[in-house]
Image (tube, helix red, strand yellow):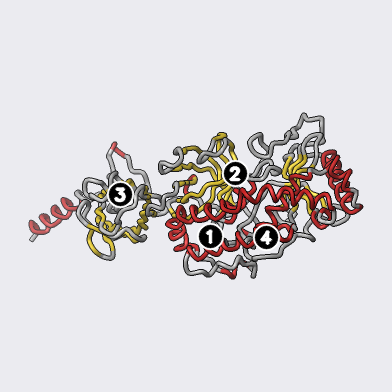
Amino acid sequence: MRSLLLCLIISILACTSCIKIIDLSQNNTDNNEEVEDIKPQDEAKLLSFNINKELNPVINENIEFTIYSNNNITAYTKADFDTKHLIASFEIENGYATINSRYQESGISKNDYTNKFEFVVNGHNNKKKTYIVHLLPYTGLPVATITTCNEKEIVNKEDWLPANMHIDGMGIFEDFNDSLYVRGRGNGSWKFPKKPFNAKLYNKKGVLGMNNHKRWCFLANYRDRTLLRNDLVFKLGQMTDGLEWTPNGEFVEVIFNGKHQGNFYICEHIRVDSKRVNINEIKANTTNITGGYLLELDRYFDEVNKFKTVINEWPVNIKSPDEDVFTTEHLEYIENYYNTIEFLLQEGNFELLYNEYLDINSFADYYLIQTLSGNTELQSIYSVYCYKKRDGKLYAGPLWDFDLSTFSRESGTTHNTSVWYKYLLKDSAFKKVLKERYTKLKPKIHDWGIDYLNKQYAYLHKSEAENWKYWEIDTNFLYNRLNGDETFATYEEGINRLIYMFQERINWLESYLD
């Protein structure tokens, strides 16, 4: 018995000597012993995703997808082909993939890429990660891919987000690459589901064949079924002689942080520049304060530097000089100058007005384009630009903001109560200039307008179809201010109506001026 008890004690001591108790809350490095980390099984990771031409005879070049941290897997096509039976090649670490619970084999499985779909990566540790795969079909438009730092979304109009942008010119334009900043833009348009934004490049560069500059606008055209109203009016403005500069623009597809955002119109931002509003810029050391001034009459009245005129209380926003340069001396000068114009208009002293203060040709051409388009913004006083040159007169323009309430009525909208024109239309000399300039303008625009709209329809209809998938117009956002084509079933209907309205407004304007 005594020997049996001794054996039991020896066994217990032998077992306990093999047990090592580790305090995981402390760093145990006694006696240089290494403690192996206890890790959960590694999660699955998607390393690559592409569609290779060797496995897909319908394509001429490989399609490389970008895998974004927000779980989007996105690419675009450079040619028109059937996307219903494509084979993807992908690499997954520590897991496998499924689509609609069907196991996917890299280089083998065929899938339909006509629309977005979920690509689920299943980890061996039973964790899943769902990606959204989107292959943007060929629309014929350039593709602008913008990725912000940490893939942050634009949430306001104040904060600039650093980003990178690549534009594939699709053989129509030169490709573009640069770093930039982006932020939201617009007043009423910022409230819509599809939001416009501004871009500020690090360096002055040309975009899509336009002149070098840092500042660009991405217009969403959410409330315009045709997408063409701004573009059409800008082209009309460029045909006039009196409007010295009207913005240029081009249509693009926008992929923002891996999400296709639809059709946007990249256009030149209204800025003081030798290639844009060409006036002498007032800087900190400028002693001649007579110009230049870039002004916007706008009821939002939201600039830091601004004033209202004495007689009509027109809201005048100072867009240039910049805030850090603008002084009370500048304010007194331009406010007095503008109030003098308003006084001369009210008094009917048109001879002095045209000789010393106001450029009649630019105001005539500005009126013609505003009235031809039937733009109600001029009546409401929104986005009404003008500028004053150094030692020179006040000029009308540039044109801006024509996506709403334009080409919506066959007749009317005479602007005989709109800002300056409620006075100028009482002057026989101004009406004579209007007729002369319209006689010169009409041969340029009539047949051109019809041809141009048909051409743009052919160019944009594929893009519009993709855009309409996301941004079918909700008229509740338009506050009963409609173009009249928002609910049309087809894009072609919208274009045909725009062509009809364009012709009717030319006919009406001609009879009105007579």
- Disc 1 target residue: 226
- Disc 4 target residue: 374
Image-quadrant location for residue 210: top right
Does dot 2 land on a helix, a strand or a loop? strand
For marks 2 and 3 on the same chain, the one whose residue lies earlier in the sequence: 3
Q: How far apart are marks 1 and 2 (CA)?
A: 20 Å
Q: How far apart are marks 3 and 1 (CA)?
A: 36 Å
Q: How far apart are marks 1 and 4 (CA)?
A: 16 Å
Does dot 1 land on a helix, a strand or a loop? loop
Residue at 30% x, 56% y is: 83
For this view, does 271 lie left or right of residue 463?
right
For marks 2 and 4 on the same chain, the one whose residue lies earlier in the sequence: 2
Q: How crowded is mark 4: few (under 14 residues within 10 Å), some or many (20 or more)?
A: many
For this view, does 224 lie left or right of residue 45?
right
Q: Is residue 404 above or below residue 316?
A: below
Dot 4 amino acid type: Gly
Q: Nearer the viewer, mark 4 or mark 3?
A: 4
Q: How crowded is mark 3: few (under 14 residues within 10 Å), some or many (20 or more)?
A: many
Does dot 4 land on a helix, a strand or a loop? loop
Image-quadrant location for residue 206: top right
Residue at 76% x, 48% y is: 363
- Disc 2 target residue: 268
- Disc 3 target residue: 49
For marks 4 and 3 on the same chain, the one whose residue lies earlier in the sequence: 3
Q: How far apart are marks 2 and 4 (CA)?
A: 23 Å
Asked whether the residues under the numbered discs 3 and 1 touch, taking CB atoms below 8 Å apart as contact, a structural biologist would say: no
Q: Which of marks 3 and 1 is in front?
A: 1
Q: Residue 127 location in percent, x, y? A: 31, 59
